[in-house]
Every structure is written in structure tokens, then in C-alpha cells.
Image (spheres, coloured by chain):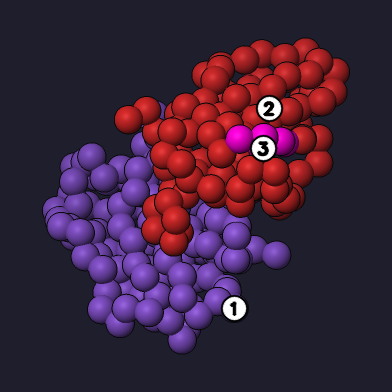
Chain colours: A purple, B red
Amino acid sequence: AQTVTQSQPEMSVQEAETVTLSCTYDTSESDYYLFWYKQPPSRQMILVIRQEAYKQQNATENRFSVNFQKAAKSFSLKISDSQLGDAAMYFCAGPLFNKFYFGSGTKLNVKP
Amino acid sequence: NAGVTQTPKFRILKIGQSMTLQCTQDMNHNYMYWYRQDPGMGLKLIYYSVGAGITDKGEVPNGYNVSRSTTEDFPLRLELAAPSQTSVYFCASIRPGNTEAFFGQGTRLTVV
């Protein structure tokens, strides 16, 4: 069963504009972390942002922020002032008990 | 600090051959994972380990075996390689509390 779902295979954004990537998940745990990872063509996995479930406040890292809706099990990533270097695959990920699952990814294109 | 080290980076196998993908981490993490990533797809969990001597299956374990004799090492064994195992393989370890995953650089495996 898929426990982390990304429903947007590909998205495009104009440079300097804002884009939101969606993610939903399923877990029976009460406390957990959720993550967004960026994977450029080099295939390196780069941590973008992390959210702890018991924290009500949405995490923010510079131009990256999340909209975490615990009851809805939704965890979206907002990228503000998009830059050409943001073009990559983005994966939502989260632990379920001892396992660490990834979504299928969203390919982000940034247009100059 | 080396982090997570995977070897080899590239490998071509013939159908029916066997090989071991090596993964070593020097962060004293208990949790370690093996994933495969097919082209344009997300990461699928193959096997994971929560500590030395303890391993368990993930989403796609068929055709693979693992062992965890030490905290540092988590090798992945492919027996009787098949073309369906052509993929990029990632090893990861997770900081206690599931606060962040650290990834190796990946192994690109082609089975012909």
C-alpha cells in the first residue's frame, strides 16, 4: 500500500514566481517527521525541509515553506521566488514505524 | 566525516550473475535502508535494518538479500540478476528520532 502519495508528476513555474507541490500520506503514528527532498540530475538526494508532526507551526527554510495539515494528512511544499536552480525532482517522504517511504516524485521545471 | 559510502558507482551484470552492493556509514546510525529507483520514478524500499543482526523486508524485496553483522555495514546481495533489476540503488541511514536521512551517491546497475 502506498503510504506517501504525490499526485503531480510534473509541474512548471516561471522564474521568480511561486509554486506549490502536493503530498498526502497515511500513518497511524502520532509523532513523526515529514520531509521534502530534492533530486537534481546528479541523483544526489538533498534535504529541502523537515516538519515534525507535533509542531503546529509550519516549517520554513528561506524560500521553501510547507503547509502541514495533520488532520488531513497533507504536506505541501511551497517554493517562493523560484530560481532556475530549483529545477529538479522533488520527493515527499516520511517514516512509518521503522520504514521510510517516498512518494513517486514531482518533476519541477523552471522557465526563464 | 564520510557519511554513507556506496560501492561500486556503476556496474554491468549479465543475466544470472550475482553481486553485492556495499554500503557503509560512519555516523553510528542504527537504521539503514536500501532503495531502488527506476527511471522517472520514486524510491522503492527493498530492505531495511533497525540494528546489527536485525533486517526486514520493504516493498520490493524479491531477488535481493541483506545482512547486518555490524552497525556500520549493510550490504545488498543480488542473486541470479535479471533485467528487471536494472536500476539505481541507494543506501541510506537515518539519524535517531527519524530526523533526517543520509544517502549514499547511488549505484547504477545494468543487467544485460
Number of the front mark, 1 or 2: 1
Q: Residues within 10 Å of mark 3 (few under 14, many from 20)?
A: some
How many numbered tags mark residues here?
3
Q: Which residue is pictured at 40% across the width and 75% down the height?
A: A53
Q: In this view, does B95 lie above or below A56?
A: above
Number of the front mark, 2 or 3: 3
According to the image, label 2 marks what residue? Answer: B86
Residue A35, x across and y down, in percent: 40, 59
Task: Classify residue B96 as left or right of residue B110.
Answer: left
Q: How far apart are marks 1 and 2 (CA)?
A: 34 Å
Q: In this view, does A62 lie above or below B13?
A: below
Tell me the quadrant of the picture where the C terminus of chain A can be found.
Answer: top left
Number of the front mark, 1 or 3: 3
Chain designation of label 2:
B
According to the image, label 1 marks what residue? Answer: A28
Which quadrant holds residue A56? bottom left
For residue B68, the mark is 3
Q: Is the magenta stretch mostly helix, strand or loop?
A: loop
